Image (spheres, rainbow, N blue to C red):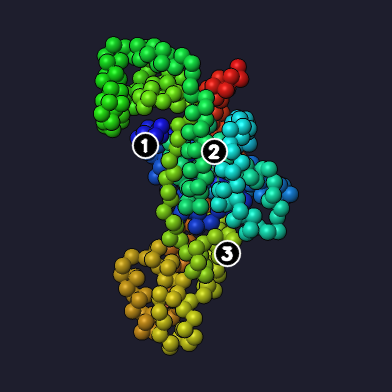
């Protein structure tokens, strides 16, 4: 176990700065982040080092993409008052943890991560037989563990990376969490909580270790979370002591699977840069209108008088995202009876996409006019992230006898 209880979890997620965001990101990832930021302490970061693992031969675009990405997040509604936004390379502690974790990570674990071979196959034009690319998921583990994140919102393709992170954390805790005087230290830490809480803790611990009472475990964890009198190291000891193990230095995260985005691309496949079917968040209204007017429809509708089938038409998928029942019924009937034309059918979709993009684009413009403000948001985020990362590294170095 050794996972962070969900209600206390810190959320962490990152994106590689490989180009401007599009509606697929907005519907698939960002809207999810917007909800999470109200519920949890969130850290969202630009994974610029991860971009380097595949773009090492031409890194010149990364700084601009990083900047644009943060502006797109802000414009989409990520709130710097609620969530911490930062840039990976500005928190060099990630690299230190990556290095230290590399000492205990068996090569086979990395070679077996599915994305390792898949991406090498997919990106044949690049030489990805590098040390850095093999380490990609371990760097991601460091990103996650350095914030002791409990929840990591990711798509299906990233779940294996979170799984690796859990294994690495387990191994780390197993090797380094065993202090010689662990039990004495734990008993001392219990006393520091005060008589009443110490008694409660012992009661819950007994109920869990002797009867496997999961509720008692949850209650004990909640009790520890609320303690003000004990430091982080003591708290970690007591978390570990609860389950009969050693000290939990790096808690295991859970993936929070992001539902596959329903947002279709202009050709009806999933919207993705690699398919060239995206609508960029910063596309001008004229460009968006043109993209939608020229997008393919049911190939069977050659003439206006031919009836069509919405199930064979990408435009219908847009209606599924944007239209209410009444409008959808109008499409279904009008298309099948050839009583509406395709341009007519697209008009409400065009309106809906433009209406969705308008406020986002206005905010993009506002932020672009205030580079100082954006700079400050990023600087502050970097600082806040570093404060947490430094604290974790103190524990990690101590556990590894590096001090
Ligand atoms: N590998 C992730 C992706 O390609 C990006 C990423 C890097 C990430 N570090 C992370 C996501 C940590 C979640 C947590 O999408
Ligand atoms: Fe597609 Fe609408 Fe044309 Fe039917 S009427 S083929 S749903 S665009």
The secondary structure type at the circle numbered 3 is helix
Coordinates of residue 31 in the picture (x, y in percent): 43, 50
Nearer mark to the viewer, of 2 and 1: 2
Calculate the distance from the C-alpha at mark 2 to the C-alpha at mark 1: 19 Å
Q: Residue at x 43, y 14 (%)?
A: 185
Find disc 1 in the rendering and name its residue. 6
Coordinates of residue 390 in the picture (x, y in percent): 56, 25
In the displayed structure, 76 sits above or below 192; it is below
| Closest to the observer, 272 or 35 | 272
Residue 351 horizontal side relative to residue 289, left or right? left
Q: Residues within 10 Å of mark 2 (few under 14, many from 20)?
A: many
Q: Residue at x 48, y 48 (%)?
A: 159
The disc, 2 or 1, on the residue closer to the chain's N-terminal end is: 1
How many numbered marks have been drawn onto this rendered protein structure?
Answer: 3
Label 1 C-beta lies within 8 Å of the nearest ligand 1 atom: no
The disc at residue 219 is: none
Is the residue under label 2 in contact with that under label 3 (CB below 8 Å)? no
Find disc 3 in the rendering and name its residue. 275
Say which quarter of the image contains residue 386: top right
| Closest to the observer, 147 or 99 | 99
Find disc 2 in the rendering and name its residue. 141
Q: Residues within 10 Å of mark 1 (few under 14, many from 20)?
A: few
The disc, 3 or 1, on the residue closer to the chain's N-terminal end is: 1
């Amino acid at each position: 176990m050794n996972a962070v209880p969900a209600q206390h979890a810190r959320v962490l997620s990152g994106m590689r700065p490989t180009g401007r965001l599009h509606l697929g990101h907005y519907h698939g990832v960002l809207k999810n982040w917007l909800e999470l930021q109200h519920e949890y302490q969130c850290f969202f970061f630009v994974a610029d080092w991860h971009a380097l693992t595949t773009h090492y031969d031409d890194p010149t675009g990364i700084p601009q993409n990083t900047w644009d990405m943060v502006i797109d997040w802000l414009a989409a509604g990520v709130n710097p008052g609620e969530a911490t936004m930062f840039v990976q390379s500005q928190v060099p502690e990630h690299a230190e943890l990556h290095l230290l974790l590399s000492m205990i990570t068996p090569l086979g674990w990395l070679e077996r991560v599915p994305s390792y071979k898949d991406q090498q196959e997919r990106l044949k034009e690049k030489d990805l037989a590098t040390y850095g690319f093999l380490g990609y998921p371990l760097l991601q583990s460091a990103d996650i563990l350095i914030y002791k994140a409990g929840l990591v919102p990711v798509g299906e393709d990233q779940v294996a990376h979170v799984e690796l992170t859990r294994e690495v954390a387990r191994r780390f805790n197993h090797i380094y969490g065993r202090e010689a005087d662990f039990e004495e230290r734990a008993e001392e830490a219990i006393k520091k909580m005060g008589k009443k809480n110490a008694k409660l803790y012992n009661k819950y611990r007994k109920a869990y270790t002797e009867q496997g009472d999961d509720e008692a475990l949850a209650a004990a964890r909640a009790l520890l979370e609320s303690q003000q009198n004990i430091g982080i190291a003591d708290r970690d000891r007591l978390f570990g002591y609860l389950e009969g193990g050693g000290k939990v230095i790096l808690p295991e995260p859970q993936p929070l699977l992001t539902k596959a985005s329903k947002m279709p691309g202009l050709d009806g496949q999933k919207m993705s840069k690699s398919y060239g079917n995206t609508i960029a968040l910063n596309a001008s209204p004229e460009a968006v209108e043109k993209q939608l007017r020229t997008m393919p429809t049911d190939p069977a509708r050659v003439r206006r008088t031919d009836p069509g089938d919405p199930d064979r038409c990408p435009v219908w998928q847009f209606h599924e995202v944007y239209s209410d029942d009444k409008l959808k019924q109008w499409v279904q009937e009008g298309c099948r009876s050839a009583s509406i034309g395709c341009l007519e059918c697209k008009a409400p979709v065009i309106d809906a996409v433009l209406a969705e993009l308008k406020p986002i684009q206005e905010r993009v413009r506002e932020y672009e006019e205030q580079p100082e403000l954006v700079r400050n948001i990023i600087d502050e985020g970097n600082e806040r992230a570093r404060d947490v990362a430094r604290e974790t590294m103190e524990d990690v170095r101590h556990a590894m006898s590096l001090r």
